[in-house]
Image (cartoon, rainbow, N blue to C red):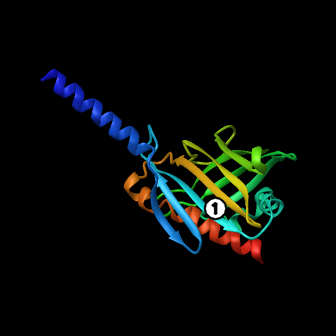
Amino acid sequence: MKTFILIFLALLSIEKLTAQQTWKLAKDEDGIKVVVSEVSNSEYYAFKAIMSVKTTEAEIIKKLKDVQKYPEWFAFTASTRLLAQSENEQSFFMETDYPWPFSNECMNYQMVFEKLQDNVMKVSINGTNTHVQCEYSLKKASGYILLEPENGAIKMTYYFHSEASQNIPPWLINPRIHEMPYQTFKALRKKLNS
């Protein structure tokens, strides 16, 4: 009996580990694909959004460095403020708009621009609660954006995972988490093509 229980628990652990690494399609529309996945030690899903856009890497980086204009295209962004900026790094404050009855949450982010092999640009995004001045700040937030040349266009991959500090039920956020990157990519593409 003990052996059976141990085998059963081991199988459950393997199944859970596999599930945490499995991406599921959440949205595929207008040339934008969003997949979501469980994350180990978190009740909240991570997302990965992918699209190709006819522009240059330089134009995308220009938009990413223009932090003050994020509320114009970065979905559910209530306000932003640039804290520091150099050629390959920047830090900024961002307030995320949460629906009623929850309050907005904020975080300071560090963004690093790094050229990888095969002419791929990686933009790392890491949240830090250092000196954040707001009522609610996210528990954690991290991700990246990859910019890869693709047949005269740029393939963008945006991965992100965050956790709210308020007691927002995962069943309320997880089924809708794909809307943020989808709306962000849609608005960014429009900005890049205008």
Q: Quadrant of the N terminus?
A: top left
Locate residue 117, reporting x and y percent. 76, 44
Q: Secondary structure at mark 1?
A: strand
* Residue at the image point whose x is 37% and y is 55% from the top: 171
> Is residue 7 shown left or right of residue 33?
left
Quadrant location of residue 11? top left
Locate residue 166, reporting x and y percent. 47, 48
Q: Amino acid at mark 1?
A: Thr
Q: Compared to 22, does 189 lie above or below? A: below
Q: Nearer the viewer, residue 5 or 87?
A: 5
Q: How many marks?
A: 1
Judging by the rendered image, the residue that carries numbered circle 1 is 77
Q: Compared to 99, does 164 lie above or below? A: above
Q: Which residue is situated farthest in the top direction here?
A: 2
Residue 116 appears in the rendering: no
> Is residue 50 shown left or right of residue 45?
right
Residue 176 appears in the rendering: yes
Q: Compared to 81, does 6 lie above or below? A: above
Locate residue 39, reporting x and y percent. 46, 43
Q: Residues within 10 Å of mark 1 (few under 14, many from 20)?
A: many
* Residue at the image point whose x is 71% and y is 68% from the top: 53
* Residue at the image point whose x is 64% and y is 62% from the top: 78
> Is residue 93 shown left or right of residue 106?
right
Q: Nearer the viewer, residue 31 or 134?
A: 31
Q: Quadrant of the C terminus?
A: bottom right
> Is residue 97 shown left or right of residue 86?
left
